[in-house]
Image (spheres, rainbow, N blue to C red):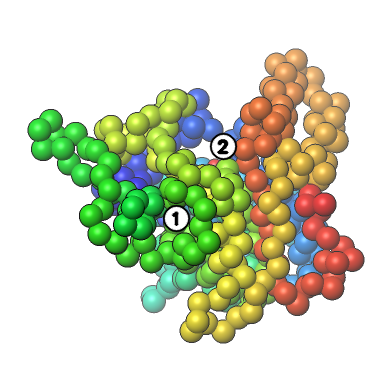
Amino acid sequence: MKEVLTNPTAGYYMNRDVFGQTGDFITSPEISQMFGELIAVWLVNEWTKCGRPTPFQIAELGPGRGTLMADILRVFSKFKIAGSDFSVSLVEVSPYLTQVQEKQLSPRQAQEATKLPQGSQHYKQSISFYGSQVRWYNHIADLPRTFTLFLAHEFFDALPIHKLVKVDQGWREVLIDLNREDLTLRFVISRDRTPACLYRLDNESREELEVSPQSLIITQAMAARIHQDGGIGLVIDYGHEGDKTDTFRGFKNHKLHDPLVDPGTADLTADVDFSALKWAATHPRTFEDWKANLTFGTVDQKDFLTRVGINLRLEQLLASCRDEDVALNLKSAHKMLTDPMEMGSKFKFLALYPSVMEKILERYPPPGFV
Ligand SMILES: C[S@@+](CC[C@H](N)C(=O)[O-])C[C@H]1O[C@@H](n2cnc3c(N)ncnc32)[C@H](O)[C@@H]1O
């Protein structure tokens, strides 16, 4: 999965635009500005609850086309939060998408002035339309140490999983093998235990499951930063609470695609196990010095968006809309984002807070989650 998606030369994400009508799938920020605007207002609200520390950073993992961040920066500027108040840190592996994000977020002259200081942790830098520094990083561990608003929208579902299955002898891993007769790929069960079988499987009642160690490591890194430097995390994705078994699949031209056919030409994805992310956010690795964080959720996208005001935002946009086609698009975007039969129930929201905020959150719980 890692090779197919992020191999430097042939990886699915590395050299093409995979989003939208002409791509393989569409994501919520691409459907409507309402999505990013409501997330931005939520972030301003929660940052205010923390005492409005400055300077801070907004760190987005896997920003895609940069649309969500562009909507967020526009809303922040309306609240007069801009310039040196904060910086934008983008964790992105794809050189192609890095360019798309830069065009979306920065004026042309800023894009051309990209000389990096020696020894920088980031691989690219620019200035946003609203005067804030934008920097690109390969890994969450490289981000600057400061108060951080973390965002991960449809990021964790792109990280590699291991498939495990219970057989008579115990847990084994499902591997991918080459069928020598016709040179096709096929699933096989490992003869012995593999390192992935060391995953904590006590009390596991499922006979088959998917685990994503990379997701756990990244969540622990985010949780450590939230505890040590202050911050909040918002994770949005399709997923489950540790009860699903087989969700690994491919997407090509908006249709399901066999992941073993023409690898590299289709998106590969698996539902996010939110119960595992919550475990990682509240369990430091033994050598690390941070305490358990607080987690809220998951809640369904429909509930989150409705509670933070998507219906009101739709009304406002419709009231100022003079074009019938635009009005129809707004209504259909609202339906797509919130209808339980579309994205409303499939997508979930999870929030992470440092444990020092426990008392504040008892009085003022995170909007959208209650
Ligand atoms: C499914 S797209 C989601 C894009 C965007 N968040 C959205 O919702 O429109 C996944 C994003 O994560 C990036 N990505 C995938 N694996 C990554 C990794 N290991 N590290 C950093 N970025 C990664 C992809 O290049 C892409 O930008």
Mark nearer the N terminus (2 vs 1)? 2
Residue 233: image quadrant is bottom right
Q: Residue at x 64, y 79 (%)?
A: 291
Residue nearer the viewer, 20 or 133: 20
- Indicate left or right for 209 with 223 as reference: left
- Disc 1 secondary structure class: strand
Location of residue 282 with respect to 96 vertically, above or below = below
Residue nearer the viewer, 90 or 73: 90
Q: Position of residue 143 (x, y in %)?
A: 51, 70
Q: Which residue is mark 1?
A: 211
> Under 8 Å from ligand 1: the CB of mark 2?
yes
What residue occupies the far right of the structure in this picture?
363
What residue occupies the far front of the structure in this picture?
168
Residue nearer the viewer, 12 or 317: 12
**Disc 1 marks which amino acid?**
Val
Q: Is residue 335 visible?
A: yes
Location of residue 234 with respect to 341 vertically, above or below = below
- Indicate left or right for 81 with 158 as reference: right
Q: Is residue 74 visible?
A: no
Q: Nearer the viewer, mark 2 or mark 1?
A: 1
- Disc 2 secondary structure class: loop
Q: Are marks 2 and 1 in contact (CB under 8 Å)?
A: no
Q: Residue at x 57, y 60 (%)?
A: 277
How many C-alpha atoms fall within 10 Å of the one at disc 2: few (<14), some, or many (≥20)?
some
Residue nearer the viewer, 182 or 289: 182
Q: Which residue is mark 2?
A: 27
Q: Residue at x 44, y 55 (%)?
A: 211
